[in-house]
Image (spheres, grey):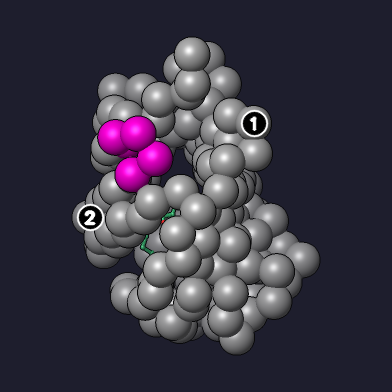
Amino acid sequence: MPVDFSGTWNFVRSENLEAYMLTLGIDFATRKIANMLKPQKFIKQEGDVFSIQTTSTFRNYSVKFKIGEEFDEDNKGLDNRKCRSVVTWDKDKIVCTQNGEKKNRGWSHWIEGDELYLELRCEGQTSTQVFKRA
Ligand code: VLP
């Protein structure tokens, strides 16, 4: 059975978000707010088509993609840099490569038990976020 990411996921904890945001050039005030947030993720997976909505009291971010198909990503409300992104399967992980100005930028999602993991990568910094199924 292939993994199904669909569902509502509530923030549990994050690691190293500050360093990740610094590599993206996020300003001081925004970082202070972002570090306090407990975002929710709403994921819809239909075959190889995904939509991921991240919501918070501060800002929201949505992305839609099909596995293996490149798409333009604007990162609006995050660092606002445009990327050419693509998501692929690596066993039971989905792995996004965000090609653009920042080197080695991307993220991965996977599930362990009832927890959703998100690893955010940019230029040698890695931040991990953990969510629990609502
Ligand atoms: C930017 C860095 C905080 C901080 C400023 C704004 C949206 C995979 C992927 C969907 C993400 C989440 C990015 C979090 C980076 C914070 C506003 C936070 C709420 O998720 O699920 O593409 O990239």
Question: Residue 72 bears which disc, if any?
Answer: none
Q: Look at the image and tell me in which quarter the C terminus lies.
A: top left
User: Closer to us: mark 1 or mark 2?
Assistant: 1
Q: Which residue is mark 2?
A: 57
- When the figure is inspected, residue 12 is found, relative to residue 61, above or below; the finding is above
Is residue 111 or residue 32 the one in the foreground?
111
Residue 89 in picture, x, y percent from top left:
58, 41
Asked if residue 61 is among those painted magenta in the image, a careful observer would answer no
Say left or right for 105 vs 76: right
- For badge 1, the amino acid type reads Lys
Q: Label the magenta part by its dominant secondary structure.
A: strand
Q: Can residue 42 be seen in the rendering of this structure?
A: yes
Q: Secondary structure at mark 1?
A: loop
Quadrant hosting residue 4: top left
Of mark 1 and mark 2, the one earlier in the sequence is 2
Q: Can residue 28 be seen in the rendering of this structure?
A: no
Q: Secondary structure at mark 2?
A: loop
Q: Residues within 10 Å of mark 1 (few under 14, many from 20)?
A: few
Asked if residue 46 is among those painted magenta in the image, a careful observer would answer yes
Is residue 85 or residue 38 the one in the foreground?
85
Ligand 1 location (quadrant): bottom left
Magenta-colored span: 45-49
- When the figure is inspected, residue 52 is found, relative to residue 77, above or below; the finding is above
